[in-house]
Image: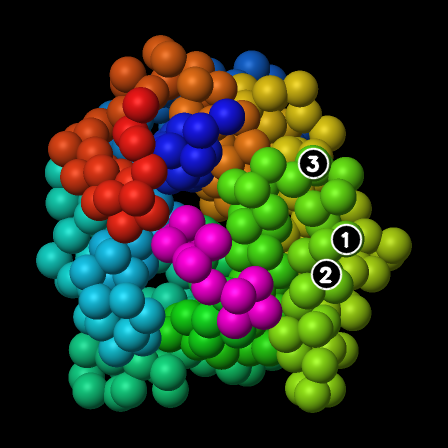
Amino acid sequence: MPLSRRLAGAVWGHLVGDAVGVPYEFLPAGAIRDVEFGARGSHHQPPGTWSDDGALMLALLDSLLEVGFDPEDQGRRAVAWRFDGAYAPGGNVFDIGTATRTALSAIRAGTPALEAGPDGERSQSNGSLMRILPIALWGEGRQDSRELARLAATASRVTHNHITCRAVCAVYTLLAEGLLQGQSREAVLPRALKVARDAFEADEPMLAAIDRLEHWPATHEPAGRGGALDAFWSAWTAFSGARDYRHTIERAIRYGNDTDTTAAIAGGLAGAHWGLDGIPGDWLAGMRDPEIVRPLVERLLAHRAVDAR
């Protein structure tokens, strides 16, 4: 599969998963039956509307493509979403997590971006994981894998500085990198964990966090909740056991709870794996404000020097 289809598939896969999941957010798993594009539910948004997950992912992608890796610029663009509606369909901001709200308010008030993200025990949420995908899209094949993991952990700090969040972002970025390279689902997770450990070999707290991430499924069932570890494993389980992109999103949403985020995280992986053509055409056609997304995808392909076909 051409890299261009994987790159575009990852961007759109994340956004479509987010949009399909938005109406089901906060519902328990038992209340979700058929998963349909355009259902009207929790946030009463028009069909095809992505949330903070998609908008902050696009903000990070825009920053990377415009100036390279610069956390201060990443923070400014995230603030532009929060307070000005940038990157959001219709300019409407309707969903934001507590840690992200705290961090972006601090950045707006003048706090340096890398000091803005909370690091308390209650800040181990999925708000940096949901937006970290562009680190892989921008850097795969252009950055050493270990450096890519370190950049992802640093980018997490803009909104989430807890070490669990940083570790989860590093491993997820390596998963996406591997899928863009065509690695199998069986091989990509063990490789990501190994490379992450290599990247942080002198950082004992980070190595301990990676260990917690790896062993989390031994004592927990995926539940689609807002914690970073649960979000990672819910998304990975939905994707790794799915037949195709649509099945990935349906599985992610049926966990209930933070459905838009779980589906966005899983959708980015599924889009990288099955490519743009694996996303249902009617779902893609129903997305709002594609003019926000298409120029960013075109710039991404130009950055990666790949043909858009």
Which portion, as a residue range, is magenta?
A: 134-147
* Viewer-nearest residue: 176 or 119: 176
* Viewer-nearest residue: 64 or 260: 64
Label drawn at residue 85: none
Residue at label 2?
193
Residue 204: x %, y % from top left: 73, 86
Residue at label 1?
190
Residue type for callout 2: Leu
Mark 3 near mark 2, Cβ–Cβ under 8 Å? no
Residue 159: x %, y % from top left: 40, 71
Q: Disc 3 and disc 2: Cα gap in Å? A: 15 Å
Q: Disc 1 and disc 3: Cα gap in Å? A: 11 Å
Residue at image coords 37%, 67%: 100
Label 2 residue SS: helix
Label 1 residue SS: helix
Q: Is residue 82 magenta?
A: no
Residue at image coords 86%, 56%: 219
Callout 2 crowding tier (Cα within 10 Å): few <14, some 14–19, many ≥20? many
Residue type for callout 1: Pro
Residue 120: x %, y % from top left: 55, 82
Residue type for callout 3: Ser
Mark 2 near mark 1, Cβ–Cβ under 8 Å? yes
Q: Is residue 254 visible?
A: no
Q: Is residue 229 left or right of residue 90?
A: right
First in residue order: circle 3 vs circle 2: 3
